Amino acid sequence: MKVNKFSLPLISFFVSSISLLLAYYFEVTFDLIPCDLCSKQRSIHFLIFFISIITFLCMKLSFNFRFICKLIILLWISSMVISIYHFGIEQNFWLGFTECSAKLSFDSDTLKTLLSQNPIRCQDVQFKILNISLAGWNAFISFSVFIILVYVLFVLKKDEYEK
């Protein structure tokens, strides 16, 4: 595989944009409502998308963008961690935050609490592909992209980033 200084932001740009497009496609096509963790995962993909664009601009302006590339890799780690956490909640490996779990305490403020929360719980799987939820796929894709980007970062010579 030929690796150049455009590889890291290019891979991040395309994978994050395809992930976002597919998420919104499934949401619109199958009337899915994203839970809180799904929204957080999307926000990380938006960050990756925009920082990849910034990285291209830095390359055009001849700035050293090695730091930004490391930031992109950290965002992919964040996406992977949140996705694994979300997948674990879906599989009942652990409980989620109070806004994600189904535990309710019935008292005088129950209705107020229910109305202030997202109606979709993070533990409810709305859609699966090959019997794996979208959070599971996001974890797999984020991990794969992380490994590829670390490889790309270490294959590139330091002078290529400084050009």
Image (tube, grey):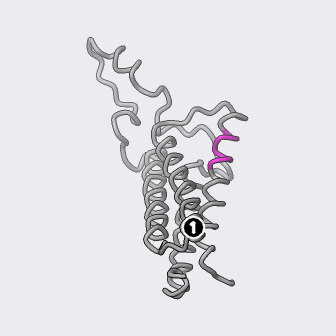
Return the residue nearer the eye: 33 or 3. 3
Q: In this view, does 103 lie above or below 154?
A: above
Identity of the residue drawn at 50% across and 36% down: 35
The magenta stretch spans which residues?
20-26
Q: Which structural element holds mark 1?
A: helix
Return the residue nearer the eye: 68 or 85. 68
**Which residue bears the numbered disc 1?**
145
CA neighbours of label 1 inside 10 A, class few (<14), some (14 to 19), many (20+): many
Identity of the residue drawn at 63% across and 41% down: 127
Split into 4 quadrants, where in the image is the C terminus?
A: bottom right
Q: Residue 157 location, x and y as percent?
A: 52, 88
Task: Tell me: 3 left or right of 110.
Answer: right
Return the residue nearer the eye: 130 or 111. 111
Number of callouts: 1
The quadrant holding residue 53 is: bottom right
Q: Residue 123 location, x and y as percent?
A: 47, 39
Identity of the residue drawn at 57% across and 67% down: 145
Task: Tell me: 144 left or right of 88.
Answer: right
Task: Tell me: 123 left or right of 116.
Answer: right
Identity of the residue drawn at 49% across and 64% down: 72
Split into 4 quadrants, where in the image is the N terminus?
A: bottom right
Q: Is residue 153 above or below residue 96?
A: below
